[in-house]
Image (cartoon, helix red, strand yellow):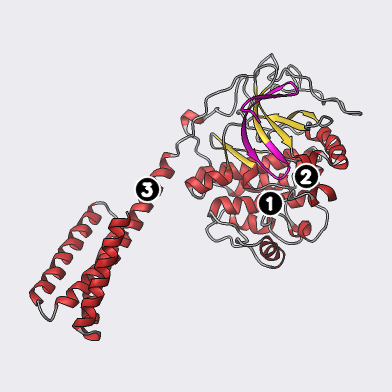
Amino acid sequence: MSSQEDLGSYRLLSLLGSGGFGEVHLALDPGGHTVAVKVLHPHVASDAFALTRLAREVETMRRVRGPHIAEVLDASLTGPRPYIVTRYVQGRPLNTVIASDGPVRGDELVRLARGLSEALGSIHAAGVVHRDLKPANVIIADGEPYVIDFGIACALESASVTASGAVIGTPGYLAPEVLEGRDAGPEADVFAWAATLAFAAAGRQPYGTGPAAAVAYRVVHREPDLSGVPSWLGPLLAECLRTDPDTRPTAPQLAARLGAAAPAVAEPAESRGAGRRPARSAPLYSGELPSFPGYAEPAPPRGRHPLDHRDAEVTSVGGINDARTQEWRPTEKKRSIEDARARHRQKLHRRWVIGSSLVVGLFAAAARQYVPEVSLLMLVLYGIGVVTDAGLGLLARSRSRVLVDVMGGVGVVAVWALLSSLFSTTTLLLAVGTVLFLLIALVVAS
């Protein structure tokens, strides 16, 4: 496919990603607005039953509106290349954010939990079940979450589509009742909501990794791993991950519970109101919406066009769109970056102190018999080094750094004494040669 081509009245600009059901393209609508076009895979497009069901579901999906929803704008399901058009949200999938930036913490986690609960409330209020909520279907833009692909997995779930290779849902986020072959209701989305937040907060899958069958078994028969999840969120996630769907909270109850349990969100001054824009008198979308039998567009609030929303811009895979394409620049989380760098420095410091104490202790033990002065000098110089570093740690008020230095000083003496008493000088010299060889190999390799 060429870099740019026309599909219906849309100009496809670039490929954004691909999933089990289709490829998502960044595109321009007839009015020059950025949208996301999901072109269904051939094996999906050839399933007449699935397309008929999807056409019926699109009528309902178009009714879903909300500040954290990537709304369906248009659809063409009758041509050789069926597609669905949604608003475009410029951002990154949640799984990509976690892979690059680490677990979500603090205010960002509160916003994520509240935003996703509000999105589920909007979806369920319209009579839609997402059925495939997971980190890859959550777009983070300017610190706010936007849900994409709602209703598509449920609408396309048919025997022929599944047999053709599309995965209906993702193990680890599919509820136990779905894995056991029962119907997926709103309760299944609540389960997926909790699994997604557990992954975001802890940075790891709540039911582990491995073959799909193994993960599915753990979902049905084991308790989730919620270690690393903040105390204000953990109990609620545990309730949502219960195997009995009738005992899980509803989406509105999630929002209420979060309002009572979550810490207050301190919004940066520059971002306040960033998710809201003044209402426009002209519609954001100028194309014709699809017409389906028996469907009537719900009446908009007085004084507003049906598609004139005042929320942040959203992506392809879902979202709210501004009148023009805007340049996207990833928002720097200065606090998170500084914390990550500090943790990285602490990790390097621990490794350096531990490694150097072992090496110096070994060298000093090997030199003890023939050149005891050198052995003593090595221990003294190492001691001076750790004392100096501990002093810097005291100035920086870093107790962990001081503790590691003290342990290193004690450790080097312990290693020296232990090796000297247990091994012969010849054995220690062979060990020294091996260490030197490995260090030289590491230097050359680097």
Location of residue 81 in the rendering, given as x and y in whole percent from the top left corner = 77, 32
Label 3–label 1 contact, CB within 8 A: no
Residue at the extreme left of the image, as rendered: 373
Image quarter where the N terminus lies is top right
Q: Amino acid at mark 2?
A: Val
**Pointer 1: what residue?**
192
Q: Earlier in the sequence, mark 2 or mark 3?
A: 2
Image quarter where the C terminus lies is bottom left
Compared with 154, 274 (above or below) is above
At horizontal 86% and vertical 36% (from top left) the residue drawn is: 56
Would residue 444 be found to the left or right of residue 38 on screen? left
In the image, 424 versus 361, the foreground residue is 424
Q: Tell me the distance, in whole angstroms, between the alpha carbons under discs 1 and 2.
A: 11 Å
At horizontal 72% and vertical 52% (from top left) the residue drawn is: 249
Please tell me whether residue 18 belongs to the stretch shown in magenta.
yes
At horizontal 10% and vertical 79% (from top left) the residue drawn is: 370
**Pointer 2: what residue?**
129
